[in-house]
Image: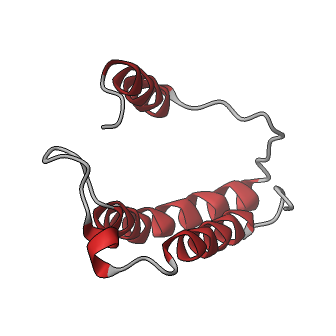
Amino acid sequence: MELNTQNYWLEDIERCKLEVRKLATGLSNEQFNWKPSAKSWSIAECVSHLNIIGSKMCPLIEKAVEKALESGESGQPPYKAGWLAAFFSEWFRARRQTHPGS
């Protein structure tokens, strides 16, 4: 994956979509919609959520990448999350530790 190309993130999303298709292939509707608990999401709900968020975020990411390329901005990994992404990452990590399986 070329990190210095405009479409690297789109290529990564396509790889993720393929992985989800592989994981979901062969599941019945019952399995796809099964919830481990009333407060948990089914696989179908997770995939739907990712599709909705992706449809909202992709245009924003595309504009940001275009703007960065036009202005000559670039960077090299490892990349650091901003404060909001870091907050959510920490929140999800803590939630997994205190609520396993949710």
Colour approach in the figure? secondary structure
The x, y position of residue 61, in whole percent, is 54, 60
Farthest left residue?
38
Task: Please name whichever residue, 31 or 24, is drawn nearer the observer in this view of the structure.
Answer: 31
Q: Residue at x 60, y 74 (%)?
A: 22
Quadrant (top left/top right/bottom left/bottom right) for the N terminus: bottom right
Q: Is 84 positioned to the left or the right of 12 in the image? A: left
Task: Please name whichever residue, 55 or 92, is drawn nearer the observer in this view of the structure.
Answer: 92
Quadrant (top left/top right/bottom left/bottom right) for the C terminus: top left
Task: Please name whichever residue, 28 or 6, is drawn nearer the observer in this view of the structure.
Answer: 28
Q: Is residue 101 above or below residue 9?
A: above
Q: Is residue 83 above or below residue 74?
A: above
Give residue 66's quadrant in the image: bottom right
Q: Is 64 positioned to the left or the right of 24 in the image? A: right
Q: Residue at x 57, y 73 (%)?
A: 17
Q: Is 89 positioned to the left or the right of 2 in the image? A: left
Give residue 91's quadrant in the image: top left
The x, y position of residue 96, in whole percent, is 39, 27
The x, y position of residue 34, in whole percent, is 26, 63
Q: How many marks?
A: 0
Q: Residue at x 40, y 20 (%)?
A: 97
Q: Residue at x 73, y 62 (%)?
A: 70
